[in-house]
Amino acid sequence: MTGTEPSQGVNWSRRAIAAAVGIALVLLGAAGGITLGHSSSPAAPTAVDIGFSQDMSVHHLQAVQMANLATGRSEDTDVRQLAFDIGSSQLEQVGRMKGWLSSWGELEQAPAGKLMMWMSGDHQSMSGMDNGRMPGMATSQELARLRGMNGKEFDVLFLQLMTRHHEGGSAMSRYAADKASVPVVQSLANAIASSQETEVKTLKSMLTARNAQPLGSG
């Protein structure tokens, strides 16, 4: 070992530390930019943003409930796969909507008697409200029937109920996509409407293949 080696080691260490500090400063600056980008004043949630997030969470959870039944009752691979896709995607969306409601300091569900109040009067008639149910929602009697079925009988009723459910959810989402103020709410509402309209075509095609027809609305 020569007398110059310790000095070289110290210099290398200093350079390494300086480089590390430089990288840290760059990352800190980038993080600061991201923070500033997100700190710009977002649009304040309106009754549409809040009401849609509350009601669509409830609407989605019924679809998840129906989808979960397919695992033990359907023997059809296509039905089981579609049910899994619907259940997993809608559960993830519920998580997002509940997260927004929490950040806004709002209730996760609308108070009793306040369902669909975020849709204005001229849309109230097309909302499909029937005895307190949101558009497309299955009744407790329909859910009980579904739980009591298996095999092909289950598949047909499941596809029928989910078709009507999606059609109702799509109408709600289209309204929110047009009327909401918060960009992420608008974006999710539009995505829900588009995906459910596509899935309705699939559901109806699957019903046709099973010599069945969609249910009436309501």
Image: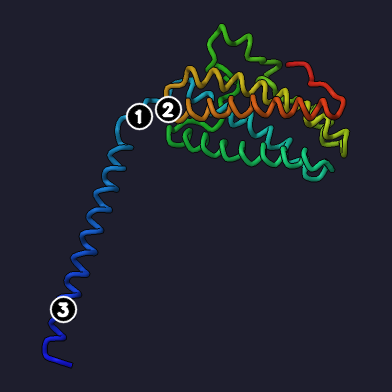
Which labelled disc corresponds to residue 42? 1
| Residue 151 point in image, percent of width and height | 87, 39
- Which residue is rendered at x = 52% and y = 21% of the image? 176
Q: Can you say whether 76 is above or below 117 in the image?
A: below
- Pointer 3 residue: 10
Which labelled disc corresponds to residue 183? 2
Name the residue at the bottom extreme.
1
Quick check: marks 3 and 1 in contact, CB under 8 Å? no
Look at the numbered disc 1 and give the secondary structure of its residue.
loop
Name the residue at the top extreme.
122
Kindly identify the amino acid type of the residue bearing the numbered disc 2.
Answer: Pro
Q: Can you say whether 6 is above or below 205 in the image?
A: below
| Residue 190 point in image, percent of width and height | 53, 25
- Which residue is rendered at x = 20% and y = 74% of the image? 13
Q: Crowding near pointer 1: few (<14 within 10 Å), some, many (20+)?
A: few
Distance of mark 1 from mark 2, alpha carbons?
Answer: 8 Å
Kindly identify the amino acid type of the residue bearing the numbered disc 3.
Answer: Val
| Residue 211 point in image, percent of width and height | 87, 25
